[in-house]
């Protein structure tokens, strides 16, 4: 199967105390985007989040897995300090540098009923790799 | 996990002798049932901890141990700086100095009963809880520095609390050696509006009834009688601690090779205690401990205000305040010699026994109160430190129940609304901004805290004093 025929998607995976986020997509960038959507789904129902606000995010790291952790942690930071929830992302990765646009809206406790706040991305089950069928996976456990 | 992997030393002590890269044995305190129910990851993680440079005696796992990050949650390990010992950001965790503080109310259940709903409403209104909640305090550069270096003492100076609170807080309310210059701008930014907030996840403020006394003499010393109402606060250093953990974890992962440290798991990232990075982390982590102590102090103040609206003139004094995610410099006796060691407790409570020099005079005779938080709708316990604990686990005990089920499993299995109704039928009031959060924290998603506490008692880590049952729970 051609990796391009895979629709980008996300899933959660089990961790005893917390929860894992995983993006699965034809490209590395889309896998990063999907994992970030998986993170929002840890907090609230995705359908409840609109795209009325836009922010840009930039980070860099010395390898692709550290870049993934940095990406997730930048989003955690923006969510925490700006009081935002995100539902859509456009990620561009150029070697060790990531630049992205994140769409979302301010947390509304009535509307979103946020279940938990994310403390940070961990190195537990951290993996970014391309499967033999060329599909990209980006995942880690987040501490909640 | 399979008990066959261990040498059973006694009913509650299971040892893994050093093998491979392990420098010391690994010891798990559990009974056969708890051990069997533990995830195999606990075995993997506690033996990994035993490989770290400068570890002394053994790597310990408490009866509530479960799969954590690098260290198991419920992990205890001490490191000797003179033997290349390390400090590990993963060994402290993201929620630095998360802990429990319990307050006396002077009320009995009969006095509370007619005012239960009013008190639940007042507490929920006054103490910010849940995702996106902000406090009324805004820290500027100067007050941030004061908070990071002063902890609960700083909070007191700002008018939050009473002088006599301090002797009933570990470190007398102020962690020495905090260096705010190693706390990043981002960590400060995450904290500036979060003082006096509970947070989310398993954090809570709970009104509890003393349901049972196991040790009348110690209970008397602690001021606890059956049917007394106490109030417990479970929370930590909020965004500041999370950001410090995040940043140093990455720095320690990246510098491990340069320090000649082989990491069996990246999450165990650490730095030599004597290295600049190790020292910077200690300075920042201690500042985060102060943040947690200040936070619980401010929440105490808010709680006092809320309670006074329902019970005018009432005084809420502290029982004690313990932290269960820390690394602290302590003196322990190794082979008959006193050594200065850095003791990591990741999801483990310090449990100094009678006569310990660091205890305030009020607890010198009986040992310190060890506050074990249950989960929403389940019992909590008050224990006290033992003399044996020093030899058993560097004076450490369990910290809570530990999850039996993941968050996603729990939210699939239960509806928040049903959980609230079921608890209401048992006379327990829940207030929470998120019904999904309530479902994820459902009582049955956690292990039985009573079994954990019984083993801690039988293992001699700490002795049971009192059992607390929830009456009102404000859930983050």
Image (cartoon, coloured by chain):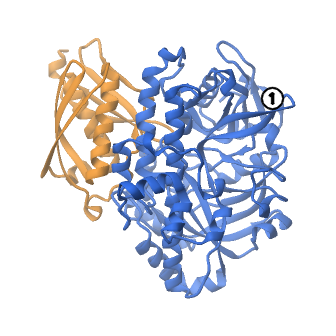
Chain colours: A orange, B blue
Task: In the displayed orientation, state which residue is furthest to the front.
Answer: B142
The residue lying at 81 percent from left, 46 percent from top is B458
- Taking A117 as reference, is B107 left or right? right
State which chain disc 1 sits on: B
* Mark 1 residue crowding within 10 angstroms, few (<14) / some (14–19) / many (20+): some
- The relative height of residue B207 versus residue A55 in the rendered view (above or below) is below
Q: Secondary structure at mark 1?
A: strand
Q: Residue at x 64, y 67 (%)?
A: B469
Q: Quadrant of the N terminus of chain B?
A: top right
Q: In this picture, is B231 found above or below B322? A: below
Residue B448, position as x, y percentages in the image: 64, 51
Q: From the viewer's side, name the closer residue of A98 and B20.
A: A98
Q: Residue A63 versus residue B112: which sits nearer the camera?
A: A63
Q: In this figure, which residue is indicated by the disc labeled 1? A: B8
Residue at image location 64% in from the left, 14% down from the top: B21
Residue B135 percent location from the top left of the image: 38, 64
User: Where does the image place residue B387, in percent across and percent down from the top left?
Assistant: 84, 47
List x then y, in percent, for residue B142: 39, 56
Give B78 or A26, whichever is nearer the viewer.
B78
A56 lies left or right of B330: left
Toward which corner of the image does residue A9 lie, by quadrant? top left
């Amino acid at each position: 199967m051609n990796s391009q025929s895979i629709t980008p998607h996300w899933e959660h995976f089990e961790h005893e105390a917390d929860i894992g986020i995983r993006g699965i997509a034809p490209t590395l960038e889309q896998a990063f985007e999907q994992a970030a959507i998986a993170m929002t789904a840890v907090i609230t129902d995705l359908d409840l989040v609109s795209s009325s606000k836009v922010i840009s995010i930039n980070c860099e790291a010395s390898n692709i897995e550290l870049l993934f952790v940095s990406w997730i942690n930048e989003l955690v930071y923006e969510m925490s300090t700006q009081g935002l929830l995100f539902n859509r992302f456009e990620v561009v990765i150029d070697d060790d540098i990531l630049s992205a646009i994140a769409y979302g809206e301010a947390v509304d406790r009535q509307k979103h009923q946020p279940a938990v706040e994310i403390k940070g991305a961990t190195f537990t089950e951290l993996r970014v790799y391309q499967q033999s069928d060329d599909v990209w996976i980006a995942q880690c456990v987040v501490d909640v | 996990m399979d008990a066959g992997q261990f040498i059973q030393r006694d009913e509650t002590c299971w040892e893994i002798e050093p093998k491979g890269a392990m420098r010391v044995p690994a010891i798990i305190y559990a009974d056969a049932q708890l051990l069997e129910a533990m995830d195999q990851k606990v075995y993997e993680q506690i033996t990994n901890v035993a490989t770290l440079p400068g570890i002394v005696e053994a790597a310990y796992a408490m009866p509530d141990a479960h799969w954590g990050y690098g260290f198991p949650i419920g992990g205890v390990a001490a490191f000797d700086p003179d033997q290349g010992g390390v400090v590990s950001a993963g060994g402290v965790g993201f929620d630095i100095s998360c802990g429990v503080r319990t307050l006396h109310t002077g009320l009995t259940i009969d006095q509370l009963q007619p005012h239960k709903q009013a008190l639940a409403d007042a507490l929920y209104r006054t103490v910010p809880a849940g995702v996106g909640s902000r406090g009324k305090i805004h820290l500027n550069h100067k007050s941030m520095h004061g908070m990071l270096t002063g902890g609960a003492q700083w909070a007191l100076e700002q008018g939050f609390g009473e002088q006599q609170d301090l002797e009933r807080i570990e470190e007398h309310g102020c962690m020495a050696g905090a260096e705010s210059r190693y706390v990043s701008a981002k960590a400060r930014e995450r904290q500036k509006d979060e003082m006096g907030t509970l947070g989310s996840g398993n954090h809570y403020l709970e009104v509890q009834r003393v349901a049972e006394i196991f040790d009348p003499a110690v209970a008397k010393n602690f001021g606890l009688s059956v049917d007394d109402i106490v109030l417990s606060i479970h929370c930590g250093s909020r965004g500041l601690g999370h950001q410090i953990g995040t940043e140093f974890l990455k720095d320690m992962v990246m510098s491990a090779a340069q320090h000649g440290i082989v990491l069996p798991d990246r999450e165990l990232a650490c730095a030599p205690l004597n290295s600049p990075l190790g020292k910077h982390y200690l300075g920042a982590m201690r500042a985060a401990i102060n943040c947690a102590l200040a936070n619980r102090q401010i929440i105490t103040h808010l709680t006092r205000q809320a309670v006074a609206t329902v019970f005018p003139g009432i005084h809420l004094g502290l029982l004690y305040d313990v932290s269960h995610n820390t690394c602290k410099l302590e003196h322990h006796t190794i082979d008959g010699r006193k050594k200065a060691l850095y003791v990591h407790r990741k999801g483990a409570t310090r449990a100094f026994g009678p006569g310990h020099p660091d205890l305030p005079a009020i607890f010198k005779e009986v040992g310190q109160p060890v506050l074990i938080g249950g989960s929403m709708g389940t019992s909590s316990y008050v224990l006290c430190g033992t003399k044996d604990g020093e030899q058993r686990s560097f004076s450490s005990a369990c910290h809570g129940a530990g999850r039996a089920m993941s968050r996603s499993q729990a939210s699939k299995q239960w509806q928040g609304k049903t959980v609230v109704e079921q608890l209401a039928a048992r006379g327990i009031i829940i207030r929470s901004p998120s019904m999904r959060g309530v479902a994820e924290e459902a009582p049955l998603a956690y292990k039985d805290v009573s079994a954990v506490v019984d083993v801690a008692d039988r293992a001699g880590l700490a002795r049971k004093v009192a059992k607390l049952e929830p009456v009102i729970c404000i859930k983050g």
